[in-house]
């Protein structure tokens, strides 16, 4: 039969840049580790040793935390990584 039209629906996504740099409260499934609220701002960062981490803060109870690969890490952990400048 006839082939489907050669369309590229993903084109707009490629042009919009890295989505991780934008605040994505609900769609990111980030929930506060203290109160469970999804009113959380998550910011992607890269430490000096190249580790991609997220800094998140809750608008509900103002709890803040760091995460790497979806798992919470301590601020001391972040600092020790940041100091590892080799
Ligand atoms: Zn909270």
Image (cartoon, rainbow, N blue to C red):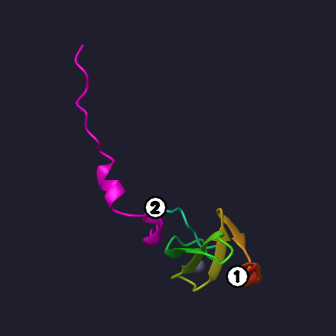
Q: What residue lies at 74% left-to-right and 84% top-to-bottom?
A: 83
Between 18 and 62, the residue placed more toward the observer is 18
Query: Which of the two residues, 86 or 65, is positioned nearer the viewer here?
Result: 86
Instruction: Looking at the picture, tell me which residue is in the foreground, 59 or 81.
Output: 81
Judged from the image, the secondary structure of the residue bearing numbered disc 2 is loop
Q: Is residue 71 magenta?
A: no
- The residue to which callout 2 is attached is 27
Give the label on residue 72, or none: none
Q: If the image is split into quadrants, where does the C terminus sit?
A: bottom right
Q: Main secondary structure of the magenta part?
A: loop
Quadrant of the image occupied by residue 53: bottom right
Residue at the image point whose x is 57% and y is 68% from the top: 31
Closer to the camera: disc 1 or disc 2? Answer: 1
Question: Horizontally, is 38 left or right of 36 in the view?
Answer: left
Q: Which residue is mark 1?
A: 82
Mark closer to the chain start, 1 or 2: 2
């Amino acid at each position: 039969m006839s082939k489907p039209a050669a369309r590229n629906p993903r084109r707009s996504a490629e042009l919009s840049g890295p989505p991780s740099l934008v605040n994505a409260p609900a769609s990111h499934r980030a929930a506060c580790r203290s109160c469970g609220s999804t009113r959380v701002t998550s910011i992607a960062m890269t430490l000096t040793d190249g580790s991609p981490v997220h800094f998140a803060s809750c608008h509900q109870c103002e709890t803040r935390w760091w995460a790497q690969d979806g798992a919470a890490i301590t601020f001391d952990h972040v600092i020790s990584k940041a100091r590892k400048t080799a």
